[in-house]
Amino acid sequence: MSNRKICIVTGSRAEYGLLRWLATDLRADPDVHLQFLVTGMHLAHEYGFTIKEIHADGFHVDETIESQLASDSNIGMVKSMGLGMIGCADAFRRLQPDVVVLLGDRYEILAAAQASALMGIPVAHISGGEVTEGAVDDWIRHAITKCAWWHFAATEQYCQRIIQLGETPDRVFNTGDPGLDSISRLSLLTREQLEAEIGLSLQDPLFMVTYHPATLGDESPALSFGKVLNALDRFPQATVIMTKPNADAGGRELADMAERWVQKNQHRARCFVSMGQLRYLSTMRLANVVIGNSSSGIVEAPAAKVATVNIGPRQDGRLKASSIMDCPDDESAIVATINLALSETTRAALPATVSLYGECGASERMKHLLTSLPLPARIKKKFHDI
């Protein structure tokens, strides 16, 4: 089983942050030939050209696929996905990987999953079986599941959902969520170090805000995000650290809105295209509340014992810890829920928060499976009836 070629495909800053420790553990194994295929937002300067973070971590990038069109419409997403699938076909032909590792639910990852499946390359899919009813990510995730050979799920409930989709139970594994590994394995920055990094005094209350387009929401993402910004105006003493949204339809307008709001509040706010895992998680640990609709507020924030105000329908269906407070896309409701998150009652309960996404060590468990499971002679899946 020497020199097993394992190809990690990544298309976004958030996804790479979750894959980083798995890649680190695979690189350390002399019997593994680690490959990196980088695509999507990583190669777009508009989204921070975050391939530089992969290089900074010392990883060799074997292939790049420039698939991200300068459009954030639904049509642009479809065309980007098509370019990604064509690029993956050529890259996989050159790389000849034994396994392709994919994480999550973005459309560029679905392109890689389809290319792998059609070329007979086994896919190991991380974070399948989850539900996010407010975004197209939901069905994309399930479609990737059907392309995958092995499944590394975050919880037992998600394992059962993968099996419900017809996948054979002996190829479904409860590994926990790799997002928790960065909290335990990174040496996070102190408040003083982080202030020096971002050039802002981080006075309490400290709000960390990430808001992505809810692609299946009932109103336009811009209208919904406008209510979030109006709610933030109601907390003039708060320090606000904001990260810009992803490349889903409507994301560019939200990024412009975020930039304008921060410019008007430069004395107390900063906005980032990408903070990198170290600064992002350091900010989260220091924050009084995480605000928005990002999965990091669902998975990582409870593990860091930080309250989350989860806005709108984007994360509907996910398992949620006691520290997560849902509220609709409504200014008054957002203000009331932020006040609840800041209350003494909530703060007193945070130390008892239990993560619902397993324990640290998911990356090590995945690495063990990727290096020890026998490779299939042929990708021939049977539908598992319940």
Image (cartoon, rainbow, N blue to C red):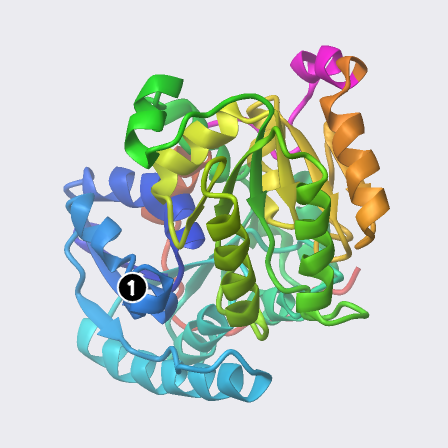
Res 49 → quadrant:
bottom left
Image coordinates of residue 346 in percent, x first then y, are: 76, 19
Q: Nearer the viewer, residue 279 or 180?
A: 279
Q: 200 above or below 41?
A: above
Is residue 160 part of the magenta span, yes or no?
no
Whether 156 is drawn above or below 69: the answer is above
Q: Residues within 10 Å of mark 1 (few under 14, many from 20)?
A: some
- Can I make out residue 163 in this image? no
Would you say 136 lies left or right of 127 here? right
Q: Residue at left 56%, top 51%?
A: 127
- Report the residue at 53% width, 39% height from top: 177
For the residue pair 95 and 334, the one nearer the viewer reads as: 334
Q: Which residue was labeled with disc 1?
A: 98
Q: Looking at the image, is 332 positioned above or below residue 109?
A: above
Quadrant in which the C terminus is drawn: bottom right
Residue 160 x, y percent position in the rendering = 72, 49
Instruction: Locate residue 366: give its quadrant.
Output: top left
Give, as a single range, the part of the protein colored magenta.
346-361
Picture residue at 35% right of the left edge, 27% below the top: 194
Q: Left or right: where does residue 163 sit relative to residue 281? A: right
Front residue of 272 and 298: 272
Q: Quadrant of residue 281?
A: top left
Callout 1 secondary element: loop
Give how far across and how far down residue 353 sits, in percent: 69, 20
Q: Where residue 240 appears, x then y in whole percent?
A: 54, 37
Q: Amino acid at mark 1?
A: Asp
Residue at image x 74%, y 55%? 227
